[in-house]
Amino acid sequence: MGIAGSKGLSLRGRLNGRFWAELGLGLASTVFAVLTLAWRDWVEIVFKVDPDHHSGSLEWTIVAVAVVVTVIAFAAARFEWRKAATAAAAASA
C-alpha cells in the first residue's frame, strides 16, 4: 500500500506496550525534573518535612535522578521505535 497514511498506521500498530510505557515514563520524569527545578521547596511543602535542612541537596538529587531516568526511558523508546520502523519497512517491501 503506497498511501503515506497507511505506512504510519502500520508503524503505529507495530509499537508495543513497552514503547508507550517508556515514552510515558520519559515524559513524566521530564515534567518531574522541570517541576522540581521551578518549585524547589515542594518536598517540604507536600510532605511537611525538611530532610535536607533547606540546603537544596535533596531537590538536586531528585532532578539528577529524573534526568537520568528521562535519558534512559527516551533511549529505550527510541530503540523500540526503530525496531518497529524496521519491521514495518520489511513488511511493506
Image (cartoon, helix red, strand yellow):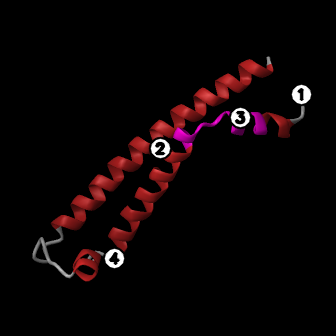
Labels 2 and 3: the sequence-earlier one:
3
Name which residue type carries label 2: Phe
State if disc 4 and disc 2 touch (CB < 8 Å). no
* Three-letter residue code for mark 4: Trp
**At numbered mark 1, what does the secondary structure look like: helix, strand or loop?**
loop
Q: Amino acid at mark 1?
A: Met
Asked whether disc 2 touches disc 1, contact meaning CB atoms under 8 Å apart, the reply is: no
Q: Residue at x 33, y 69 (%)?
A: 36
Answer whether residue 38 is magenta in the image: no
Instruction: First in sequence, mark 4 or 1: give its number.
Output: 1
Q: Relative to 16, say whether 66 is above or below.
A: below
Q: Distance from label 2 to label 4 (Cα)?
A: 24 Å
- Residues in magenta? 8-19
The disc, 1 or 3, on the residue closer to the chain's N-terminal end is 1
Query: 10 Å neighbourhood of mark 2: few (<14), some, or many (≥20)?
Result: some
In contact (CB < 8 Å): disc 2 and disc 3: no
Q: Which mark is residue 11?
A: 3
- Disc 3 on helix, strand or loop? helix
Foreground tag (2 vs 3): 3
Q: Position of residue 81 (x, y in %)?
A: 59, 35
Q: Residues within 10 Å of mark 4 (few under 14, many from 20)?
A: few
Using the numbered discs, state the Cα–Cα distance from disc 2 to disc 3 in whole angstroms.
18 Å
